[in-house]
Amino acid sequence: MKKTILCGLCILTAGYTLTTSMPVRAAELVRPAAQEETGETQELLTAGAGELFAVSLTEDEYKRIARNAEGARWGYTDLGICNVQENNLNIRKEPDEGSKLVGKLPKNAACEIVSSENGWAYIKSGKVEGYIKEEYLLSGFGAEQKGREVAKTFAVSSANALNIREMPSLDAEIVTQVAQGEALEVAEFLDNGWIKVYLDDEEVFVSGDFVEVKSDLPTAITMTELLYGQGVSDVRVDLCQYAKQFLGNPYVWGGVSLTKGADCSGFVLSVFAKYGVNLPHSSRAQANSGTSISSSELAPGDLVFYAKGGTINHVAIYIGGGQVIHASNPKTGIKISAYNYRTPAKMVRILQD
């Protein structure tokens, strides 16, 4: 049976409301009779805002259109969300568990579902495309609901060197600078045009004039990001691969657990402990361990330190390819960043090989 159903579909992205109007005949605005609105239909009716059009659709047709419009959030048409309890989901070249790995899909990461057959889904996520087991993938409304739960809002630097300030004022002290294109998670939008953001485990401020605000979901990790250059010792390679197993695990101030939670120096301490290296539980103290090196000497397994007001307050492990892995903050947990996502203050070699 055909129903006259309000079709007002709204997509929220990058801090803006984008109204999607379906290519259908506009008619007189009519709300369906209350007795015809099932709980599921009512949820769909209130899912969006903007212009409302009364169109003749079956409830299944309406749900399909609503699902596609909601899935178009964050740039996806048929949104999938990785549904694993921990670690990452393997992405393979062919729909076979023995096939070559082409990437990893972290917990709660998003993908475009291209097709699915025989228990495998062919997906595209970030720079990776390939097959994953369909049983570990949320789709449809489940994916959209999870996406709304886990999506984060970021302030992306549009300046060559974005000043990070201690207070929301051009007169405030500059804590550090971040490179163009670096994304900082938004904590709060202020009325004066400034944005409070998370920089590792601190709340700092950036001017809204020099950033682009967007909402996004995490995506797949390429195998290139997991590889290392020639000449790197087996110990260094193994240490970095070991550290990457804990991507996405929680940040806990004062913690040293790689699974239940660690802070930046606790993460480094625990990773290096596996290789028989004892380090203090303090980024400042760790910076005084080992041998100072230059950025041109950085190799996987070296430590990169960052400072606030000249004082070391954060540490990360260099993993090659211009990237570090670190326990960033309670919002993002253990993550991978560009090694110069903020200005490095010092680089240290702990492994002497």
Image: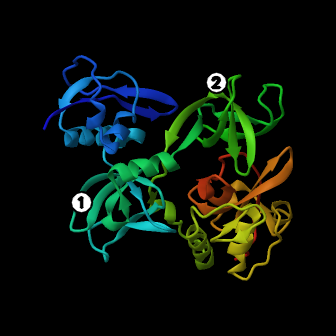
Say if 251 sits above or below 218 in the image: below
Report the residue that reaches farthest toward the top: 28
Query: What scheme was used to colour the molecule?
Result: rainbow
Q: Residue at x 24, y 16 (%)?
A: 28
Say if 236 sits above or below 318 in the image: below
Q: State the residue in front, 306 or 125.
A: 125
Of marks 2 and 1, which one's residue comes earlier in the chain? Answer: 1
Q: Residue at x 56, y 71 (%)?
A: 241
Q: Which mark is residue 209?
A: 2
- Type of residue at label 2? Asp
In three-dimensional space, the C-alpha distance between marks 2 and 1, rounded to whole angstroms, equals: 43 Å
Q: Quadrant of residue 72?
A: top left
Tell me the quarter of the image containing the N terminus. top left
- Type of residue at label 1? Ser
Q: Is residue 265 left or right of residue 321?
A: right
Report the residue that reaches farthest toward the bottom: 276
How many discs appear?
Answer: 2
Report crowding for label 2: few under 14, some 14 to 19, many 20 or more residues within 10 A (C-alpha). few
Q: Disc 2 on helix, strand or loop? A: helix
Q: State the residue in front, 148 or 8.
A: 8
Q: Is residue 257 left or right of residue 15?
A: right
Asked whether the viewer can see residue 173, the reply is yes
Percent from the top left, x then y, of residue 50?
39, 23
Say if 56 sits above or below 199 in the image: above
Q: Which mark is residue 116?
A: 1
Q: Disc 1 on helix, strand or loop? A: strand
Asked whether the viewer can see residue 268, the reply is no
Report crowding for label 1: few under 14, some 14 to 19, many 20 or more residues within 10 A (C-alpha). some
Q: Which mark is residue 336?
A: none
Q: Residue at x 53, y 66 (%)?
A: 228
Tell me the quarter of the image containing the C terminus. bottom right
Q: Residue at x 30, y 73 (%)?
A: 99
